[in-house]
């Protein structure tokens, strides 16, 4: 059995590539055309969703937003030196988050509610969940009571439970309608309030900021005041402690003086003095001993001449002066006389006497130095004894005054603490007067004149865009997953067969009108499409034998009958004998349209009541003959076999140049393949944007299994705009016509 593509090649047709990559590719031009064709769908969806968004916006209660901003100021104002009683916040992300949490706490919001109620009475009624619009009757009663004072009565006071319930409701409502957030990485907190009342929004946003700042200032002042009171109380306690400690010290000292006759301070000073004197005396002793030993040693070894000024006195100085004068005189006499001269002998005797006297004086001086050494030694011993006695007395008194020292330490500590607290009290008293909040208001809340939500224009624009996007998606989805054929190229790729031509959609209401349109416009798009089919199939050639061609379709209402009639009428103009055999006995469309008075019909031929030529109806007035049944649904349709129909067609080919067979649809009618097998050439009709893809594929599969060769495809009833895009236009006369290319 030959394949469809091999049969097409034998007939002179090139098979179309069925590469899956080409089938899966997206034709951007086709997609753009689909979008343009579906522009009204996009517009409708956009308008629909825009209208819905506008309607929703009109039904939403408008809300007004007010914003206030506070800045957590990290800068410190130093008014005086010293440590602050209340430390400043060290700002960080965690601290800012904590401050926002404070603003959202129920205790803080409760304070805000109290402040709003005090400043703006009854303004919170707008967000109270328990508040309901009064009924008409209640409004009338309240109006009557307002007009008649004697009927008016004071509203009953709320109980504590009702007040608590109202506050709890309002806490929830305020949390719902307000927000506090940090601005980016700054230390600014934005407070936003969104309510149906612009005045309420401004009141909430402004009051939250004011209460937060006031609460900070009050907390700092309260802490500073509490610290100041504590310091003041502590100063009084320490002053009494200092007084008591000093009195105890004085009493202890008086008792100690009575017991020892002196005080520890006096003994301590005496010990210090004796110690200093002992040191100096010992130094003097060492100096005296050293001087005596050195002087005595030099005197005994070398005489008094080596002592120099180590030992001095007035007498020694006089003797030394006399000796020096005598020695000088002797030196003068020695220049002229020898030692035997009486004058020099006299001078020598006198010098000897003076030296003897000097020796005796130096001896007496050494004795005096030795006596001084002994005196210094005695003084040292005496001072040591006195110092030992003083130290013993000091130790005795010191052991007895341990309690005094303890009392003195306690008194001193109390005195120091008292002095420090006095200075601290002066600082805290000043700081208490200059406390500042750590936050400051940088943007106040104002009542908005326009609602922040809903925004009808924005919602409408968003609705338009959303609708347009949905419409766009619908159009794209339909274009990408369409189950029908919109272009001839798509048809060729999917079916793997050549598309011979395409006939555009016309407003024909009958077969007669279609044939009349063809006759009146012999060079129009329909005529050109029919010529293209004839030329590509090589039908009714002058140098060829008679042929038969069948128009097939996967399902009904594909236009097989009108295509058969139009092709027969077009070929008949070339002086060719053409006959149309209507084998779709279930519809019998031609006979039903024209109502010919037939002596015999196709049913008679099937049943053997007449010959084929006797059943041919030639007086159609259409230019071609017809072999059809008188009425639709006649018996005999199940008796059509391929062999019998082949004999009938061969008989007709002896008299006609072209036999056109109108076959029933392949999928609904079981004997469609039997009819098609008896025909020489086959053309499959596909209705533009109507024939299901799966139906065409199943029909081609049925034909392939029946070994029926399909010569080509014809797209019928194509949208004129799509047809114009697929073809080209040319001017002939005064009309612009489209010529369809074989795509």
Image (cartoon, helix red, strand yellow):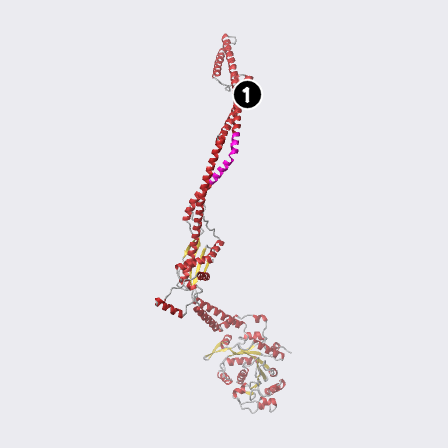
Residue 31 drawn at (x, y percent): 52, 71
Q: Residues within 10 Å of mark 1 (few under 14, many from 20)?
A: some
Residue nearest the observer in this picture, 59 or 629: 59
Question: Image height check: is 657 above or below 4?
Answer: below
- Report if residue 47 lies within the magenta region: no
Residue 504 drawn at (x, y percent): 51, 79
Question: Image height check: is 152 above or below 424?
Answer: below
Q: Is residue 214 visible?
A: yes
Residue 461 drawn at (x, y percent): 45, 68
Question: Image height check: is 518 above or below 401?
Answer: below
Residue nearest the observer in this picture, 47 or 227: 227
Q: Main secondary structure of the magenta part?
A: helix
Q: Secondary structure at mark 1?
A: helix
The boundaries of the magenta stretch are 392-414
Q: Is residue 287 visible?
A: no
Residue nearest the observer in this picture, 491 or 635: 635
- Report if residue 408 lies within the magenta region: yes
Residue picked out by circle 1: 293
Q: Quadrant of the C terminus?
A: bottom right
Residue 537 drawn at (x, y percent): 57, 80
């Amino acid at each position: 059995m030959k394949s469809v593509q091999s049969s097409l090649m034998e007939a002179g047709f090139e098979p179309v590539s069925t590469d899956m990559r080409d089938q899966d590719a997206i034709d951007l031009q086709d997609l753009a055309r689909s979008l343009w064709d579906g522009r009204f769908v996009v517009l409708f969806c956009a308008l629909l969703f825009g209208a819905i968004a506008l309607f929703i916006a009109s039904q939403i209660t408008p809300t007004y937003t007010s914003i206030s901003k506070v800045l957590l100021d990290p800068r410190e104002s130093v008014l005086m030196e010293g440590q602050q009683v209340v430390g400043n916040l060290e700002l960080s992300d965690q601290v800012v988050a904590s401050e926002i949490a404070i603003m959202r706490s129920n205790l803080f919001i409760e304070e805000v509610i109290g402040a709003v109620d005090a400043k703006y009475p009854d303004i919170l009624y707008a967000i109270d969940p328990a508040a309901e619009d009064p009924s008409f009757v209640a409004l009338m009663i309240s109006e009557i009571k307002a007009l008649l004072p004697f009927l008016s009565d004071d509203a009953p006071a709320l109980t504590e439970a009702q007040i608590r319930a109202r506050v709890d409701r309002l806490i929830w409502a305020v949390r719902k309608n307000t927000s506090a957030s940090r601005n980016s990485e700054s230390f600014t907190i934005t407070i936003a309030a969104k309510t149906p009342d612009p005045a309420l929004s401004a009141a909430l946003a402004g009051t939250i900021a004011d209460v937060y700042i006031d609460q900070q200032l009050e907390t700092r002042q309260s802490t500073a005041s509490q610290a100041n009171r504590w310091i003041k109380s502590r100063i009084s306690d320490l002053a009494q402690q200092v007084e008591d400690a000093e009195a105890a010290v004085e009493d202890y000292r008086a008792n100690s003086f009575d017991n020892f006759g002196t005080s520890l301070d006096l003994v301590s000073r005496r010990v210090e003095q004796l110690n200093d004197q002992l040191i100096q005396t010992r130094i003097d002793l060492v100096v005296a001993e050293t001087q005596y030993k050195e002087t005595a040693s030099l005197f005994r070894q070398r005489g008094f001449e080596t002592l120099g000024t180590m030992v001095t006195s007035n007498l020694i100085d006089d003797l030394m002066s006399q000796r020096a004068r005598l020695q000088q005189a002797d030196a003068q006499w020695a220049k002229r006389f020898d030692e035997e001269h009486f004058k020099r002998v006299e001078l020598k005797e006198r010098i000897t006497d003076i030296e003897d006297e000097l020796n005796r004086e130096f001896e007496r001086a050494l004795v005096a130095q030795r006596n001084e050494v002994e005196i210094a030694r005695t003084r040292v011993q005496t001072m040591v004894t006195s110092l030992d006695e003083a130290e013993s007395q000091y130790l005795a008194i010191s052991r007895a005054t341990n309690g005094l020292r303890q009392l003195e330490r306690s008194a001193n500590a109390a005195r120091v603490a008292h002095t420090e607290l006095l200075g601290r009290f002066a600082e805290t008293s000043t700081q208490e007067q200059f406390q500042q909040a750590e936050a400051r208001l940088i943007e106040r809340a104002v009542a908005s004149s326009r609602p922040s939500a809903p925004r009808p224009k924005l919602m409408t624009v968003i609705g338009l865009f959303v609708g347009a996007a949905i419409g766009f998606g619908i159009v794209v989805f339909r274009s990408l997953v369409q189950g029908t054929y919109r272009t001839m190229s798509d048809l060729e790729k999917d079916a793997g067969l050549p598309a011979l031509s395409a006939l555009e959609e016309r407003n024909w209401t009958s077969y007669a009108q279609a044939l009349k349109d063809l006759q009146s416009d012999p060079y129009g798009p329909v005529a050109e499409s029919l010529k293209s089919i004839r030329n590509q199939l090589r039908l009714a050639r002058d140098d060829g034998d008679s042929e038969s061609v069948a128009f097939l379709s996967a399902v009904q209402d594909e236009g097989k009958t009108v295509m058969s009639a139009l092709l027969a009428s077009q070929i008949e103009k070339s002086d060719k004998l053409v006959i149309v055999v209507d084998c779709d006995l279930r519809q019998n469309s031609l006979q039903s349209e024209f109502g010919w008075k037939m002596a015999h019909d196709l049913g008679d031929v099937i049943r053997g009541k007449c010959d084929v030529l006797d059943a041919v109806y030639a007086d159609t007035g259409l230019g071609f003959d017809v072999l059809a049944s008188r009425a639709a649904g006649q018996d005999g349709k199940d008796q059509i076999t391929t062999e019998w129909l082949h004999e009938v067609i061969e008989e007709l080919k002896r008299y006609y140049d072209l036999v056109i067979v109108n076959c029933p649809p392949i999928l609904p009618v079981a004997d469609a393949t039997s009819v098609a097998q008896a025909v020489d050439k086959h053309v499959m009709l596909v209705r533009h944007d109507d024939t299901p893809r799966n139906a065409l594929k199943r029909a081609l599969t049925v034909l392939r299994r029946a070994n029926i060769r399909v010569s080509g495809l014809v797209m019928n009833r194509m949208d004129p705009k799509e047809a114009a895009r697929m073809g080209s236009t040319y001017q002939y006369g005064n009309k612009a016509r489209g010529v369809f290319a074989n795509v």
